[in-house]
Image (cartoon, grey):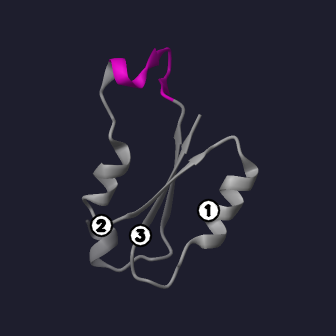
Amino acid sequence: MTAMANSLSNLVFIIDRNYCQANIRTEDLIPLETLGNKFKAFCFEVWEVDGHSFQELHECFESIDYTNGVPKVVICRL
């Protein structure tokens, strides 16, 4: 909420969504999905990409508008 209230458009969270937490699956520990919708509820722009694809990551970061006053999150999935 603070990020949106302060129009931190240059703030980008990068989440390594590999579904692991130490030695247990994250969904077995605490359900996180739908992760993108949780960030959208706080007015973040959300991108979901293949975290192993340099092409997708590059295209994602090239397409981000850092001047629109909205914080961002990039969810890098397996």
The image shows residue 22 at horizontal and vertical percentages of 50, 20
- Give SS at disc 1: helix
- Examine the rendered structure and indicate whether residue 8 appears above or below residue 16: below
Identified at 39% across, 75% down, the residue is: 70
Would you say the residues marked 3 and 1 are in contact, meaning their CB atoms lie under 8 Å apart?
Answer: no
Give the CA separation, mark 2 to mark 3.
8 Å
Identified at 36% across, 44% down, the residue is: 35
Would you say the residues marked 2 and 3 are in contact, meaning their CB atoms lie under 8 Å apart?
Answer: yes
Residue nearest the observer in this picture, 60 or 24: 60
Quadrant (top left, top right, bottom left, bottom right) of the C terminus: top right
**Residue wearing tag 1:** 60
**Residue wearing tag 3:** 71
**Which amino acid is tagged 3?**
Pro
Q: Is residue 24 magenta?
A: yes
Task: Give the magenta part as a residue range.
Answer: 19-28
- Examine the rendered structure and indicate whether residue 52 appears above or below residue 57: above
